[in-house]
Image (tube, coloured by chain):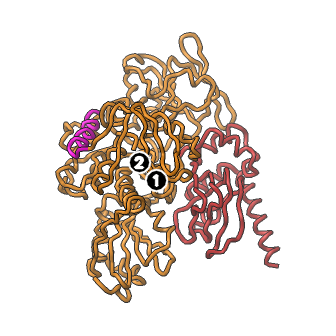
Chain colours: A orange, B red
Amino acid sequence: MVGSGPGGLQLSYSLTRLGIEHAVLSDDPAPGGMFRRWPVFQRMLSWTKPFTGVDQHEPAYERFDWNSLLADEAPNRAVMPALMDGTSYFPSRPEMQKGLETFAERTGIRVRYGTRWESTRREGDDFVLATSAGEYRAPVVVFAVGVAQPYRPPIPGLDQVPHYGDFRPVETYKDRRVFIVGKQNSGFEIATGLLPWARQLVLASPSPTKLSVNTHTLVGVRARYVQPYEDAALAGGVVLLDTTIEEVKKDGTGYLVRTRNAAGEELSVPADDVIAATGFVTPLRDLPGLGMATFGQSRLPAQTPFWESATVPGIFFAGTITQGAAGLKKHGIPSNSGAVQGHRYNARVLARHLAEKRFGIPATRERLDAASLLPYLLEQVSHGPELWHQRAYLARVITLDRDTGISNDGIVPLQSFLDSAGSDAVAATLESNGQGNPYPVFYVRKDGSVTEHALAPHPMLDFTGRDYQDELRARLEPLLSPAPSPT
Amino acid sequence: MAVRDDVVNTIAAFSLFADLTGPQLEEVAHLFDESFFGQGERILRQGVSGSGFYVILEGTAGIRVDNVDRSVLKAGDYFGEISSLLGEVPVSDIVAETPLRCLVLPAGQLEGFLTKHPRIMYRLLQGEARKLKNTTKWLS
């Protein structure tokens, strides 16, 4: 495995728990990945809510703690809340880094730090990674290297301006006109930090800004960074432009940014500083040369539902790169795999998948009795953290077999359940349609064909009541009657 | 996923977007997301809700109804418009026959997109008319 950010640490932990030997290589000197440096303004966008009424060492608490990695043993769960100083429920960047270091130390994760992955080749069934500390050979390689390589679109002159990652100390922007290319979270983060310093802020990109409070998802600018949006709406000094950037030209000590809107109207904007908040790409080095297909602006590797390269079998991914396995994207809503709260579950599912498929280690499947099935499923959609954080992406699957009874298959990618044949089963998910509260959805597989059953949302997000039991019993009737025999 | 920079050049050649200027193509490209599907992967699933409107950038896809292959779609073709326009579940599977790159717009955004771009709506209507004509010929 390559990488020691949260994705690499979570997968290493989960593989170790399953008894799978592996080596973790990292170019960094210590754990943390991108959180050793970013976000620029040193505070996370993901929250850890300390007081929830749920024991912090219970898995259900993970729904409220987006930042801690996952442990099977209670003392190593919920590392983050104890490290936070109480001034915000968004941890500071140093607190996040400390949390990852603490998890790695407590759980004994071993990483070969200062080991740089340099190139990759195939030899027979193995991959060989050439590194600064010699060659490593393995039949399965996992890359958890983040989506952290600064990217600039091919706009004339944009290669001459600093990227988000090159942001200077904030006071150096005092009383200056700053033009930010990009209207995503990174652009708005910088704009928020510059509000008390810059004379004028202009943010520009071709399409209008979306806000997460409107999309009811993590799509769009997060509430933390909405202040520049209000400033623009009230004509305070921030300007938002829906334009393409045609050219960035040096002009004396500053710049002239030439823009064009969809109606074809040109506007040239003078600025003292221009910042490219234009995103990041995946640092895949020579992997495309092995035939690895990528897509989208971030050059994400195309992946199967179990995060294996769609075109180079044997290479897998962990961490934020797993957003390249898009899943169903129902109603246009992506998974949360681009953030810790989502991809930490992907890593746990991947570890189990690798254990079963590559190392012949079968997973334990606990039995359920028929009487506990409905309460269990409703408890899962009410409190199961995997379902809350990875909606319409990960599912709890229960198999109902007439001969062997009811068994819990654990958490699996929903796409995998829908697209693979198998015994009669039910997959429980939580889903959102971007318009209101999330709601439980159950996919029932009976005699090889799958039907979808959405239940109503609940104003208090509690699906454990009698009405839900009755409704779910009716929806599962084809599976339950007659009841699968042994229990 | 935001789209790759070369998408604007690719869609400029598609009949659906034939009437758009450069800046309009740029705006359209940024409204869509980009998706990739491996060979054999399903994109739309018959009877499963929450899909979208897709435009094929590269590769081919099959239309499959009740596990029977019906037709093949290629670059520049689109699918998912019927379920998106009617607010209903798809009546067929769409399966990638080769590695497939697509643009995708969630179903709920299609109405706003088409009313904002009447020339695209007209081109789409022409496409639907062609499909209806072919179906009518086939039935007769």
Q: Residue at x 62, y 60 (%)?
A: B96
Residue A307 marker? 1
- Taking the image as shown, residue A153 lies to the left or right of residue A361, namely right
Query: Where, by quadrant of the figure, is residue A135 drawn?
Result: top left
Q: Secondary structure at mark 1?
A: loop
For the N terminus of chain A, give its image quadrant: top left
Residue receiving disc 2: A318
Q: Secondary structure at mark 2?
A: loop
Q: Nearer the viewer, residue A178 or B9?
A: B9
Q: Nearer the viewer, residue A450 or B37?
A: B37
- Taking the image as shown, residue A31 lies to the left or right of residue A177, namely left
Q: Amino acid at mark 2?
A: Ala
Note whether A261 is above or below B107 in the view shown. Answer: above
Neighbour tally class for label 2: few under 14, some 14-19, many 20 plus, Cα within 10 Å:
many
Chain of the residue that carries numbered disc 1 in the rendered image: A
Note whether A291 is above or below A357 in the view shown. Answer: above
Query: Which residue sits furthest top?
Result: A252
Note whether A359 is above or below A237 in the view shown. Answer: below
In magenta segment, residue A95: yes
Q: Residue at x 35, y 47 (%)?
A: A22
What secondary structure predominates along the stretch shown in magenta? helix
Q: Amino acid at mark 1?
A: Trp
Q: Position of residue B108 (x, y in %)?
A: 55, 58
Q: Position of residue B85 (x, y in %)?
A: 62, 63
For the C terminus of chain A, give its image quadrant: bottom left
Write down the region rendered in magenta. Answer: A93-108
Q: Are marks 2 and 1 in contact (CB under 8 Å)?
A: yes
In magenta segment, residue A210: no
